[in-house]
Image: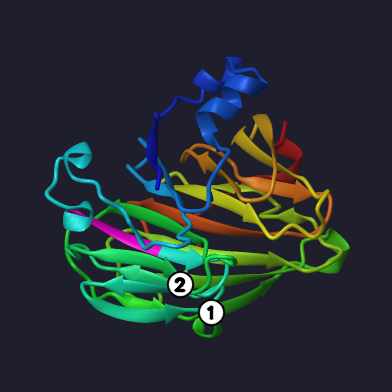
């Protein structure tokens, strides 16, 4: 089992003005999320979010972080959420085991001492996309079945952005310290997400792009300030970090899905600043 966590730093809008393609990708892209039998994580200084993939095969996997975070155990001062985008799996939380179906999620409370991830079949492993953020108090852990997620149809075919936003961790239905998390699915024949674009100065966001409509699908993710945008091309199961000042939208060569996760000082989902389409540069 390989455990790896890399650190990415925070940036000023002026920093990325001068980045070439390789520098932009190095600073904001997590190229490898899921590796069979491994845990791969990124710690971003943007609101101290930790995110990445856990892919158990023959043996269970557990995130073991303590001295790296100045704590006795990983979730001593953190909360965590995950969504499974692989095969069937199991999660054991403080000794209690639950089955996790594809696209099921979970919110796990601050103070939880043990979270162990397993796959039901090693040949078709679960792919747990995990996100953890700092927390100040414990709220109840909660299984978040895909069928119970809030489904919000959005967009239309005319604008090529017909999609459904599935809210898993959302302040309107459950308490968390700051973590929000969900899963958005574009319908066939649609390619744009989060357009018209917006920013939200009071929280940052990560996007994991997945479930591309064909093996040759690619997604271009746009970020940067509205008047100075940048783009990153993504393969399946890659993720990008968006600072609070940055727009975040994307377009694919076919349809796709993505998991979004946010944290910051405001959990109000629609606390965002829309960007006039004519101001984009």
**Above or below — where is 95 with respect to 220?**
below
Viewer-closest of 66 and 166? 66
**Is residue 7 at all visible to an observer of this figure?**
yes
**Above or below — where is 121 with respect to 178?**
below
Q: Residue at x 57, y 52 (%)?
A: 208
User: Residue 101 at what x, y percent from top left?
Assistant: 52, 78
The answer to whether mark 1 and mark 2 are in CB contact below 8 A is yes
Residue 82's label in the rendered image is: none
**Above or below 85: residue 36:** above
Characterize the local packing of mark 2: few (<14), some (14-19) or many (20 or more) Cα atoms within 10 angstroms: many
Q: Is residue 166 magenta?
A: no
Side (left or right) of 214 relative to 130: right
Query: Which mark sits nearer the N-terminus, 1 or 2?
Result: 2
Q: Identify the main secondary structure in magenta.
A: strand
Q: Nearer the viewer, residue 119 or 34?
A: 119
What is the span of residues highlighted in magenta in the rendered image?
77-81
User: Looking at the picture, does residue 187 appear above or below residue 80?
Assistant: below
Q: Is residue 114 left or right of residue 277?
A: left
Q: Looking at this rendering, what residue extends furthest in the front direction? A: 58
Packing grade of label 1 (10 A; few <14, some 14-19, many >=20) is: many
Q: CA distance from mark 1 to mark 2?
A: 7 Å
- How many numbered discs, if any? 2
Q: Nearer the viewer, residue 281 or 248?
A: 248
The residue where tag 2 is placed is 105
- Which sits in the foreground, 68 or 2? 2
Query: What residue sits 16% from the left and 56% below the top?
Result: 76
Q: Which residue is under mark 1?
A: 146
Secondary element at image label 1? helix
Q: Position of residue 64 (x, y in %)?
A: 25, 50
- Residue 268 makes an appearance in the image: no
Q: Whole-percent x and y of residue 74?
A: 22, 52
């Amino acid at each position: 089992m390989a455990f790896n966590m890399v650190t990415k730093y925070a940036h000023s809008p002026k920093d990325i003005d001068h980045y070439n393609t390789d520098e932009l990708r190095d600073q904001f892209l997590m190229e490898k999320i899921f590796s069979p039998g491994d845990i791969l994580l990124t710690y971003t200084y943007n609101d101290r979010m930790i995110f990445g993939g856990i892919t158990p095969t023959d043996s269970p996997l557990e995130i073991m972080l303590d001295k790296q975070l100045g704590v006795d155990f990983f979730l001593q001062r953190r909360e965590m959420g995950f969504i499974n985008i692989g095969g069937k799996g199991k999660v054991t939380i403080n000794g209690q085991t639950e089955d996790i179906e594809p696209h099921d999620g979970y919110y796990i409370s601050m103070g939880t001492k043990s979270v162990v991830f397993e796959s039901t079949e090693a040949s078709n492993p679960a792919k747990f996309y995990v996100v953890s953020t700092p927390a100040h108090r414990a709220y109840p852990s909660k299984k978040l079945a895909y069928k119970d997620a809030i489904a919000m149809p959005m967009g239309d075919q005319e604008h090529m952005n017909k999609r459904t936003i599935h809210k898993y961790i959302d302040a309107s239905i459950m308490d968390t310290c700051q973590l929000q998390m969900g899963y958005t699915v574009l319908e066939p024949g649609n390619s744009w997400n989060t357009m018209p674009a917006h920013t939200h100065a009071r929280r940052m966001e990560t996007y994991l792009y997945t479930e591309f409509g064909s093996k040759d699908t690619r997604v271009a993710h746009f970020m940067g300030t509205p008047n100075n945008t940048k783009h990153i091309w993504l393969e399946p199961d890659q993720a990008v970090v968006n600072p609070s000042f940055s727009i975040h939208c994307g377009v694919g060569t076919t349809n796709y899905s993505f998991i979004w996760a946010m944290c910051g000082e405001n959990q109000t989902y629609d606390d965002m600043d829309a960007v006039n389409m004519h101001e984009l540069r």
